[in-house]
Image: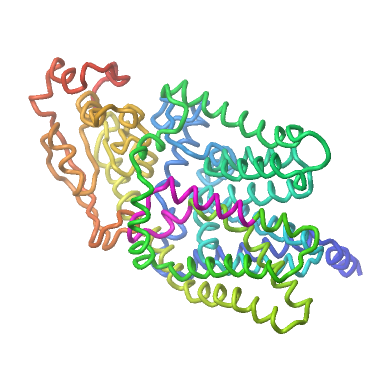
Amino acid sequence: MFLSKWIGRWWQNDVAVLTTTALLGSIVCAALMLLCGGGNGAAFWDFPLDDAWIHMVYVRGWLTSGYPSYNPGVAESGFSSPLWLIVTMPAFLIGNALGALPLWIKYTSVVFGAVTALGVARLTMHFTGNRRDGIMAQVLLFLSPLFAFSMASAMEVTLAAAAIVFALLKWMQQRIWQAGCLLALAALARPEAVCVAMGIGVVSGVWPRFRPAGKWWGHVLPLVVPVLVAFSIWGGYNVAVTGYPLPNTFYVKAGFSPMNNLQLIKPFLQSSVLPLTFWGTAVLTIGIFLNFRVFNTGTQRPFALILVAICIVSITAVFASRPLLPNITFYQYRYYIPFVPPLFAVGAVMVSNAVLSKRLFKIILTGMAVLPFVVTCIAAYPAQLNSYQSHCEEVRTVHTLPAKFIRDHYPNDHTLAVEGAGAMAFFSQKYVVDLNGLNTHTIAHSVKGTGLLCTLAVTSPRLVAVPSTWHRFITPVFRIHATQVFTYPQSNFTGTEGPLHLHIYETTLKSAVGRQKDRELLCNSQPSPFSGRSKG
């Protein structure tokens, strides 16, 4: 009797029902990724991106040092999602204690995937008032294999998506301060989310219909101020650590030209395992725009159109600021995914209007927009499951296992220079120099490329772990002796065909840069923060 009453109350509560369906859908999608890819268990016990290990290095440093640090006791600015570091701390403590850290961090991204799905459903109900339409939006979202990958990725993608969706919902509900705070959180999860804040701010300031009565600045400032405060705190930390306001990654990739993406988009789509999902989403978006010309969505129609426009502009901004490479899958798509979920809410509204109209023309038009998306996503799911397994196996083979090999075979006082800076720093128990500069700001902010050679000469790492393509960067400074090689058949990250070979070298500093005056000449007489550290 009690159970039946509880079920009845649950069924009458829209938020409870939508939360349940969001959790169930997230669990099913994540389980598919973890269980159906086959392989040797890497999907359970490792991450699909080495970047996830980088986050864990900073979480560990924050918990032990009191501030984000890459090497113990040395503050660094190599992370681009400070909010993800904070929200994963509980999972880090539990997972690390149980020896199942990757699994617990994946649980965290699954939870935020469910929060995103709940936000999409509530955004849909804001337009239609019907719980059925909210569930339909969740189904469309879960059909996307890219979103399923995101939920099992242990990355900040679902966190950023959840903050963006709920920020848009609060904005539409005219809860402006709540929307502004959520936009600030979204920007701390993924800096690109500032595009959404800018879009909402411009719309609210320019068009009176998108704000309540009153001065425009009374509506815009609550949206902008929290974002500015969040970026000021984060930028202040970066300036204190590196002397520059942005994380290292923005300076490492500063030479990127958007024209490169225009040249690479065709081979990128042709070589990726996920072009079907891309084209399916594109067709859905085009269908939304076409159908809004014939569907009447009432007083909320302008909000729906602006919502779609903000998402498209944000995705375009990411495309213009992030380099693409052929053969890249989730490694590149992850920057776009946080801006896609609101489109599913508008898509569900489109389907609902068509069905309620009972007009054959509208139903056919809607089917022409939605069915290609559904079919292409379902067709892409098997490839995505294999891709997830492949990502995890590659990280395990050329990142985690080499790091553990170095930990077990070399003294801890050795300095280690690496190209892949996540698992190496987490497991090797060595002082690590990131040759890409993402976690070594002296390289990231070097002038005329001198930072890499200068840092290598000054730190004099006894070990180097790099792919074979990096030989030319280290041989000007070191004599190298290969000790071990780890091979993966085809990389998901390099954008090149053929196997990836990770070499571990023992190094000896060449006599030409072994003297202090020669090192100073190589460094262009620039002081280095490493100069006071004993060599490994």
Farthest residue, direction bottom? 360
Q: Residue at x 20, y 32 (%)?
A: 462
Q: Within the image, what quadrant is residue 330 found in? A: bottom left
Looking at the image, what colour scheme do you see? rainbow
Is 347 in front, or is 36?
347
The N terminus - image quarter:
bottom right
The verdict on residue 319 being magenta is: yes
In depth, the one of 327 and 314 nearer the eye is: 314
Q: Quadrant of the C terminus?
A: top left
Name the chief secondary structure element in magenta. helix
Q: Which residues are magenta?
A: 308-334
- Vertically, is 297 above or below 115? below
Q: Is there any visible trace of residue 167 in the rendered image?
A: yes
Q: Is residue 450 left or right of residue 284?
A: left
Say above or below: 461 vs 27.
Answer: above
Left or right for 521, reference 445: left
Task: Find residue 95 and report its horizontal and vertical position in percent.
Answer: 53, 47
Q: Residue at x 49, y 68 (%)?
A: 277
Was residue 221 drawn as part of the magenta stretch in this picture?
no
Q: Residue furthest left?
A: 511
Q: How many marks?
A: 0
Residue 248 in the image, given as x and y percentages of width and height? 40, 33
Image height check: is 515 above or below 473?
Answer: above
Q: Position of residue 190 (x, y in %)?
A: 53, 43
Q: State the residue in front, 351 or 480.
A: 351
